[in-house]
Amino acid sequence: MNWEHNNTSEMAQRGWSILSGRVEQNLVQTALRAIYENRDKSLDVLPKYHYDTFCPDLCNPDQYSKPITDLLFESGISECVDAVMGEGLDWETSKKPQIAIRWTESPNATLHLDGFPNATSESPANIPDAILGIYLTDVQSIDDGALIVAPQSRPTIAGWAAAMTQAPRQCDRSALQSSFIDTHTETITGLSGTAFLCHGALPHKNANRISAGERVAVYFRLYLQADAALPRLRFLQMNTWGWQD
Ligand SMILES: O=C(O)CCC(=O)C(=O)O
């Protein structure tokens, strides 16, 4: 896996980029086997698990499943990400996986930011610095349940971040979320083993799965260490996405 010059400029322009190369198929197939052996079908009906994990046993923080963390640490992805994010990444927090399975009956999704508290919550935002996605099945078109992203919402988020910095108590969280721009969205496609990095403040959702079968993706929310040279939320507080050549 490699991070090329064009990855950096794509991050700066639109907030997402596909890593060059793909995760080796033996790692992908081992992860898929673990997922299907551990999948808890009783969770399928509970929408919470669509945004958490369908395999709690693989995502137990006492010991994350090796076939899943190998996708990061044996594929060359962790080195890429370290190179991009300046080795300030908190891997203990960032290696928590989400197993995201989508099929035709999955609920409709709406654009959102991960770690963004809902309107009534008192908790602070915990928006990741970046999100790493890995498709374990082929996602060749939007109908395969691709990830959809909304870079056009950047000015809205930058404005909100500025207001949040100045007067956090007066910020209307629900107003921000309902103002994400659901037109001119972009679709991330790729064959099994494709890995992509998204800016943590890039609104996103999965497209409905129309094709037969299931889409399986693994997501990792990447957080910089608290004492990293650039503080968390740095992307939100800047007018650019924070990625420079
Ligand atoms: O399944 C996907 O591709 C997106 C999942 C998602 O948006 C989330 O869990 O926050």
Image: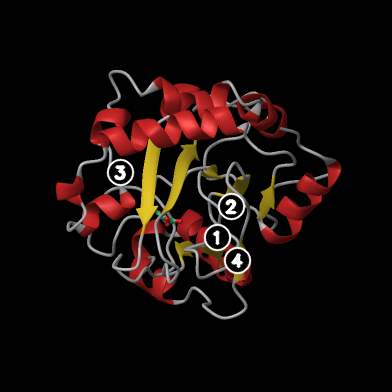
Label 4: state its secondary structure.
strand
Closer to the chain start, of discs 3 and 2, is 3
Q: Are marks 4 and 2 in contact (CB under 8 Å)?
A: no
Q: Mark 4: which amino acid?
A: Thr
Q: Mark 3: which amino acid?
A: Thr
Label 1: state its secondary structure.
helix
Q: Are marks 2 and 1 in contact (CB under 8 Å)?
A: yes
Q: Mark 1: which amino acid?
A: Ala
Residue under label 3: 53
Residue under label 4: 187
How far across and down, in percent of the image, does residue 45 sit?
17, 58
Please, is residue 85 above or below residue 53 in the view? above
Residue under label 1: 162
In front here: 135 or 60?
A: 135
Q: Mark 2: which amino acid?
A: Gln
Report, in whole angstroms, how far the alpha carbon at label 4 lies from the one at label 2: 26 Å
